[in-house]
Image (cartoon, coloured by chain):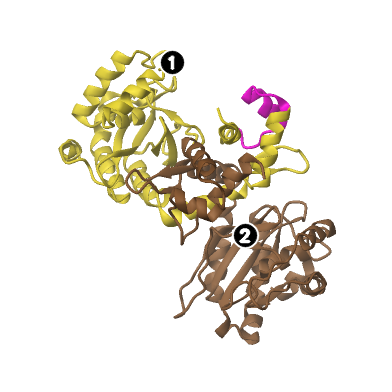
Chain colours: A brown, B yellow
Amino acid sequence: MGTITKALDLLNFFSRKRPAIGLSEFVKLSGRDKATVHRHLTELEENGFLQQNPETRAYRLGPAILRLSGVREATYPMRSVLRPVVRDLADTVGELVHASVLQGEMLSPVVHADPLGHGTQVHFDEGEMLPLHATSSGLAVMAFAPDAFVSRVLKAGLPGITQRTLTDAGAVRSLLNEVRATGVARLDRAFDEEVSSQGVPVFGPSGEVVGALSVAIPAVRASEEKMNAILPALCDGAVQATRALGGQMPPEHAAKWAANA
Amino acid sequence: MGTITKALDLLNFFSRKRPAIGLSEFVKLSGRDKATVHRHLTELEENGFLQQNPETRAYRLGPAILRLSGVREATYPMRSVLRPVVRDLADTVGELVHASVLQGEMLSPVVHADPLGHGTQVHFDEGEMLPLHATSSGLAVMAFAPDAFVSRVLKAGLPGITQRTLTDAGAVRSLLNEVRATGVARLDRAFDEEVSSQGVPVFGPSGEVVGALSVAIPAVRASEEKMNAILPALCDGAVQATRALGGQMPPEHAAKWAANA
C-alpha cells in the first residue's frame, strides 16, 4: 500500500455512525503506528480533506471534499440526476432505495431515499462501500460486467458477511447466470442479518455497466409477493437511471427490463 | 511539499472550466516529472478520487469524493443548510451570491446561487479557492479573525491578481480596520477586472469566524447606491448563515449586522 493510499484510506473510516475520529481511534482502526498516522492526518488536514475540532482534537471530513464534489457534480452530474429517480422509486415502492457506482471492485453509494412509511426501515450508510458478492447491487453489476472483471472479483476472495453470504465462487457464478437471464438480482440477508434486497444494473454511454439501483427491505416484510410487486417499478428505475446518466441499456439485454417495466 | 500533498494538489486543477485532465496536461500544470505525476494519478484513481475515461484516457474527479461529501453533509451539514440562505439572498438582491469556508489561509466555496436576472452575470467557479486579501469574502473573514492569523496571511505574501488588488500589508490592515468597524467588506475589481463584490463574515458555535457570504456583481452595474441597497439583505444573510451553521455572532460585534438588517 503506497503512502497516498494509506492516507486516503484513513478517510474511509468516517461514516454516519462515526462522523468524528481522534488520533488514537485512527491508530486503532488502521492498525498503523501513531507517528505515521499523525503525519498522514496532518497532511490531509493541511489540504482541507480533514478539519480538526480545536476543542476535542477530533477530526472530521474537511471542506475540500465539498468543493471537489461541487466541481464533479457541476461538470459530471450524478447525484443530482440520480436523486429524482431514486426518490420516485422509493415513493412508489415505499421502501429504501439506493444508487451506487463502481469504484474499483466495490460499489460506492451515490444517493439514497427513505420514504419512512413503515415502523421499521433499513438503515443505510452512504459512507460504507458495498462488496459486490454480498449485495444485490453488486450481483446486478457483476452479471453484466466483462468476464475478466468477474474473475478478478471472485479470485480476490469472497468473505462471509452473514451466514447467508455466498462465499463459493462456483455458487456466485451460477447465481450470476440467473441474474443475467432475468436482469434482476435478489438477495436474502446476505449483507445484513435483517435485510433483503433486490437490485438492477445501471449502464453508461456505451452500454457498459457503471452501477446499480437497489431496494432494501427489512427481511421480515420481504415476502416473494412483495419482491414481485416491486419488480416493475425497479426495472423501470434501471432504465430511468441509465437515461439520467446519459447511458443506454445494452441492446442485447434491454428487453429484460422493458418486459417487466 | 509531502507526497500526499503533491497528490492531493493535483485534484485542485479541476474546475468547471477544466472538468477532465490528461496526463500530459497534469505534467504541464504541476510542473512535475511525468513518472511521478503518473504514479500519483494511478494511486488517486485506485482510491476512487479520480476516474479515467477508457477512451480518451483523461481523468475526472471520482466517485469517492461524492461518497465522502455525502458522509460529511449527513453528519455535519453545511452545503444543505447554507443553500437556502444563499438562494434567498440571491433572489432578494438579484445578483450572484456565494458562501465559502476557511480552509487554511484560503476560502473554499461551498455553494452559490445565480438568479440569472440580468443580461450579464458574474461567472463563479466553485472549484476555485479564493485568496483572502483579494476578495470581499476574505477581507470580511480576516477582519474578524485572530491577529496571529492575519499576520500569517499578510506575511505569506499578497500577490497582485488585478491592477487593483491590495498588495501592501499596511494598506490591507487599514482596510481591515474599516471592515471591522462596519461589519462589511467592499472590493472593486480586486479579484477580477470586471467584478465588484460585498462580503460579510459567518461565525461558528463559539463566535469564531468560519467563512463568508458575498454578493458578486459585474462592476458596470455595481454603483454605490446599488451596494448600499444590497447591504440590509446581506447583513441579514450573515445572521441567517451563522444561525444555519449553529453559530453565533460575536456579542461585541453583533450590533453591526443587526443595525443594517
Is residue B27 in the magenta section? yes
Cα–Cα span, label 2 and label 1: 44 Å
Q: Which residue is mark 1?
A: B160
Q: Which residue is mark 2?
A: A100
At a point 54% along the width and 46% down the height, the residue shown is A33
* A95 or A65, nearer to the observer: A65
Q: Is residue B154 visible?
A: yes
Q: What's drawn in magenta, residue-wise?
A: B18-34
Q: Tell me the element at label 1.
A: loop
| Pointer 2 local density, CA inside 10 Å: few below 14, some 14–19, many at least 20 | many
Q: Is the residue A60 above or below the residue B160 in the image?
A: below
Q: How many numbered marks appear?
A: 2
- Kind of residue at disc 1: Gly
Q: Would residue A147 be found to the left or right of residue A31 on screen?
A: right
Residue A11: x %, y % from top left: 53, 49
The quarter of the picture where residue B109 lies is top left
The quarter of the picture where residue B93 lies is top left
Q: Is the residue B181 above or below the residue A60 in the image?
A: above
Is residue A60 in the magenta section? no
- Kind of residue at disc 2: Ser
